[in-house]
Image (cartoon, rainbow, N blue to C red):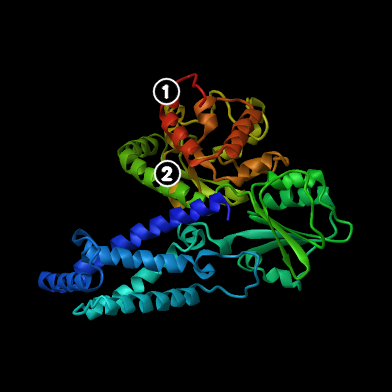
Amino acid sequence: MKINNLLKYLIRFLFLQILITFLTIWFFDKYLVLNEEEKYRLYLILVEDRNRFLPFIPMRLVSINTVLSFLTFTFLIVLYSTNFYTYVNELKYTFERRYFDDYINIYLLWNSFLFSSFFIFRFTGLSRGNLLLFTFIVPFVLILFRNSELLSTLLGRSTIKENFLTFNLEEESLFRNLRIMSFRNNKGAYFKFDSDEIINKIDEANKLVDIHLIVINVKNDLDISENLENYLLNLNKKVLIISDKNIQFKKNFIYRNELIDNKYFLYFNNDIQYGSKYILKRFIDLSISLIALFITSPMLFVLISYIYITDGSPTIIKQKRVGLHGKSFNMYKLRTMKRNSHELRESLEVMNKKSGPLFKIDNDPRLIKGALWIRKYSLDELPQLINVIFGNMSLVGPRPLFDTDTQLFDTDYMRRLNVMPGMTGLLQINERNADDFETWFKYDVEYIENWSLYLDLKIILKTIPSLFNKKVQGL
C-alpha cells in the first residue's frame, strides 16, 4: 500500500475514532446510564475486575470513559481490517446499490461486538429504549463516513448524476455492468474513431452535457496515440481504457491496471476536485459563504433597495452559465444593467474591448444610473454566495462563462471547465481588468495545475485587498 493511501486511511481512522468515541461517551452519560448512583456502581464493578484480573493497570486508567474508548478503538481496528468496509472497487461487476445491505452488515457486526462487550464488562441496568436507539446511530455514522461517495452525494455531487462517454463499447457488453459505469449515465456511444476524432467527440459532447468519465475500448486498429494520451492526462476527468494487451504509455503517471476476463483495465482519475478533496473544499465553501452572507446581508438589502428605486425589478437576475464539467446552472447577480441588456450584446459587439469569448465594454451604455461603483468593487457578485451554498460554484475557481462563450472554446480552453467555477481566482487578485482571454486562460491553467486547499485560502485572503488596488501583486 502506498504512503498516500496509508496516510488517507490513518486520517479517516483517527477521525472516526474521535467522532465515535465522543458520541459513545456522550450518549452513555446522557441517555444510557440511569443516574449517578448507577454509574458509580458500574465503576465499582470495573475496579473489582481490575483487582481480580488486571492488577498491573494503574487505577487512574480505570473509568467508564476509558473502557468505552477502548471498545470503540478495538471495533474500528476490526472493521478497518476488512476489505468490506475500507475498499470500494470501481472495477468490479455490480447490478445494484447495496447501501442498505452494507448498513445491515455493519449494524449486526457493531451490535454483536457492543452487547458482547457490555456482557464481559457487566454493564447492566442501562436504559433499554435508549440502548436500542444507540444500536442504530453508530452504524449510520460508519456508513456515512465509509468513503467519500455518500458524503459527496449529501454535499451535492452524486455519482448517479455523473455522465460518461464510451468509444467502441457495445451496448450488450458485460463491461457496462462494472460499478464505475452502472451507477453513472451513458451520454454517448461512439464506434470506429481514431485518436483525433475521439478528442473532437469528447470536446463536442462536453459543450452539450457535463461529462465526468471517458471509457475507451481499444480494439481493431484503434491505438492510443501520444496526442490522445496527453489529452486524456490533461482532461481532469476519470478515464478507463480497456484493451486486449497491456498498453505502454509515453509518460509516467499513477494509474490502476487490472486483468479482468482476459482484458486489461487501465484506470486513472485526474479529477482534482473529487472525493475527500471535494468534501473538504465544499466544507470550506459552505462555512465561509454562510458567514459572508450573514455579514453582507445588510449591504445586500441596501443595494437591492437602490436598484429597485432606480430601475425597478428584478433586482437580482439569473444568468445561465457553464460550470463543473460543462454542467449549466443559473448564476445570481445584482442587476446593474438595464433590462434585456444581454439581448443588445450583438449590436454592441464593435465596442467590445475584450478578446476571445469575453465581452466587456468601457463606459457600457447598458449600465443603470449609479451602478458603476457597484461593479467596480464587485458588489454585484455577492448573490453568488447563494450559488456557492447550493454547490453550483465555489468561492475560488475560474469565472463561469455563458454557454455561447463556451461554444467558442477549443480543446485547450475546455480544461477550465474541469474544476468548479468560482467567485474569485488567480485572475482577480493579479489582473482583474485583463482584456484578453489568453490572460484569463493562463491563470485558469495555473490554478488547475497547482490547485490545493491552501491555494484557495490564499486567494480568498487576497481577494478583498485586491478590490481596492489598481495594480495587484501575484501570489
Instruction: Write down the quadrant of residue 21 in the picture.
Output: bottom left
Residue at 19% in and 70% down: 51
- Real-space CA distance between mark 1 and mark 2, rounded to the nearest whole angstrom: 20 Å
Please name whichever residue, 438 or 274, is drawn nearer the observer in this view of the structure. Answer: 274
| N-terminal label among 1 and 2 | 2
Is residue 359 visible to the viewer in this orientation of the structure? no
Q: Quadrant of the N terminus?
A: bottom right
What residue did someone put label 2 on? Answer: 385
Please name whichever residue, 298 or 161, is drawn nearer the observer in this view of the structure. Answer: 161
Instruction: Give the number of callouts.
Output: 2
Q: Is residue 206 above or below residue 168?
A: above
Q: Is residue 360 above or below residue 135?
A: above
In the image: residue 261, left or right of residue 378:
right
In the image: residue 72, left or right of residue 164:
left
**Local secondary structure at mark 1:** loop
The image's mark for residue 130 is none
In the image: residue 412, left or right of residue 391:
right
Local crowd size for mark 1, using a 10 Å CA cut-off: few (<14), some (14–19), many (≥20): few
The furthest residue to the top: 471
Identify the amino acid type marked 1: Phe
The furthest residue to the front: 56
In the image: residue 125, left or right of residue 140:
left
Residue at 68% in and 64% down: 186
**Local secondary structure at mark 2:** helix
Identify the amino acid type marked 2: Leu
Residue at 64% in and 59% down: 163
Local crowd size for mark 2, using a 10 Å CA cut-off: few (<14), some (14–19), many (≥20): many
What residue did someone put label 1 on? Answer: 468
Residue at 45% in and 49% down: 280
Residue 390 percent location from the top left of the image: 45, 52
